[in-house]
Image: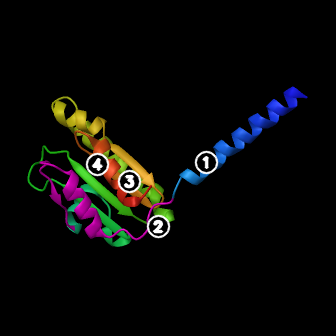
Amino acid sequence: MRKVILAEAALVLLLAGLMFLLLASKEPRMDITAQEVHDTFSSIKGNVEIDLADELRIRNQLGINPAEHDLVVYYSSSTDAMSVYEFLLIRTDDASVDEIQTILEEHISTRLEAFRGYGEFQTALLEKAILKTYGNYICLVVTDEPEIWLEAIKALLEV
């Protein structure tokens, strides 16, 4: 009898844990504006020398057409070819999430190959780049402390 009660108690705890995990994974806000992203990024970027990219630079550097997505905010260096600092937040449709993630993985891989062997600082930054997906949002962060930038975006998205 005691074994049955212990088994039932274990199952109840397991179910409670699963319910907590399911409820804790929250969908991101879908009403984030580009201005909110700019404001958040301005508050966290510190003295990193990168600027907002226009549509042409986004297409050239990433191979992504901003017109095909709900929201695209991309910061990179427009003047320093040796700078690998990047920040990107894209909101897209369900069908495009995997495609964009693949494009960004290839982007990081290509940049790593370009700097490996002579750009030790750049290689170190690219090796700790973070690429995360939150629902229909994809975030790419390349900086000294990518976790700080990512935490700010998670707060903005409320995930």
Q: Earlier in the sequence, mark 3 or mark 1?
A: 1
Q: Residues within 10 Å of mark 2 (few under 14, many from 20)?
A: few
Q: Earlier in the sequence, mark 3 or mark 2?
A: 2
User: What is the distance, in whole Å, between disc 3 and disc 1 at their CAs?
Assistant: 19 Å
Please, what is the three-letter code of the amino acid marked with disc 1?
Answer: Phe
**Residue nearer the viewer, 2 or 80:** 2
Residue range corresponding to the magenta coloring: 27-54
Is residue 35 a member of the stretch shown in magenta?
A: yes
Which element carries disc 1, helix, strand or loop?
A: helix
Residue under label 4, please give it: 149
Quadrant position of residue 153: bottom left
Q: Earlier in the sequence, mark 1 or mark 4?
A: 1
x%, y% of residue 75?
Answer: 21, 57
**Residue nearer the viewer, 143 or 54:** 143
Q: Does the rendering let one see residue 59?
A: no
Q: Could you tell me if the residues under marks 3 and 1 are in contact, i.e. CB atoms within 8 Å?
A: no
Is residue 46 a member of the stretch shown in magenta?
A: yes
Q: Which mark is residue 20?
A: 1
Residue under label 3, please give it: 154
